[in-house]
Image (spheres, rainbow, N blue to C red):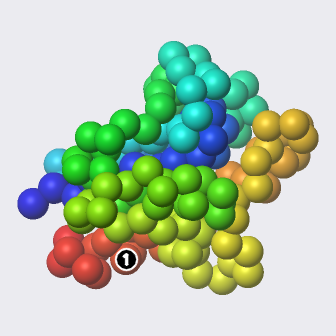
């Protein structure tokens, strides 16, 4: 059994690639890379083909996580291929639910719904705010990724 997880934000250069990289790192550390596949996408086409934001790359690098992905836009096929499609905020969640075909089997939720001990449910967009905001977002993403991995392991018996 393979579990497929897709993280989604607006442009796929700040939050969702950070979540992809952090979650993949945790999956690798748990020895589950052959059972959990990870990707990210954006709801918009603003940054297709671009590297992750320098702030995202810097905070990942500072935490020992490599990331070389390129931005892409979510496609109709993603709703068939992924088991979990996780939005970084309510606006992207609404967009995903609107885009999803009625027969989708994917779990479509906010990413931070899986974060234990975090009082907010939306990952703020650090795009305009500088490095301290990227570090804050990293801490939120880390909590969400840990909670999501625990949830998947319990639900799928991994």
Q: Nearer the viewer, residue 53 or 65?
A: 53
- Is 97 left or right of 150, judged from the image as shown? right
Residue farthest toward the top in the current orientation of the protein: 49
Q: Residue at x 23, y 50 (%)?
A: 80
Secondary structure category for the residue under label 1: helix
State the count of labels. 1
In this image, 130 relative to 88: left or right? right
Residue 30, above or below 58: below
Residue, x 47% and y 32% (percent of image)?
A: 73
Where is residue 114 shown, x and y percent of the image? 51, 74
Q: Residue 79 location in percent, x, y?
A: 30, 50
Residue at point 55%, 67% (across, down):
110
Foreground pick, 76 / 124: 76
Residue 58 lies, in percent from the top left, at: 70, 31
Q: Is residue 114 visible?
A: yes
Residue at image mark 1: 151
Question: In the rendering, at what x and y percent does residue 26 appear?
Answer: 42, 55
Q: Is residue 106 left or right of residue 21?
A: left
């Amino acid at each position: 059994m393979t579990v497929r997880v897709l993280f989604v934000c607006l442009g796929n250069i700040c939050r969702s690639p950070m979540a992809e990289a952090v979650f993949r790192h945790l999956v690798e550390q748990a020895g589950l890379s052959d059972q959990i596949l990870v990707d990210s996408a954006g709801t918009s086409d603003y940054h297709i083909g671009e590297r992750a934001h320098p702030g995202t790359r810097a905070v990942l690098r500072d935490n020992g996580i490599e990331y070389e992905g390129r931005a892409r836009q979510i496609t109709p096929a993603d709703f068939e291929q992924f088991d979990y499609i996780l939005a970084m905020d309510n606006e992207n969640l609404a967009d995903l639910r609107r885009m999803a075909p009625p027969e989708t089997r994917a779990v479509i939720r906010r990413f931070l719904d899986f974060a234990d001990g975090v009082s907010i449910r939306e990952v703020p967009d650090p795009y305009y705010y500088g490095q301290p905001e990227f570090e804050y977002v990293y801490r939120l993403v880390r909590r969400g990724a840990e909670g999501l991995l625990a949830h998947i392991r319990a639900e799928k018996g991994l």
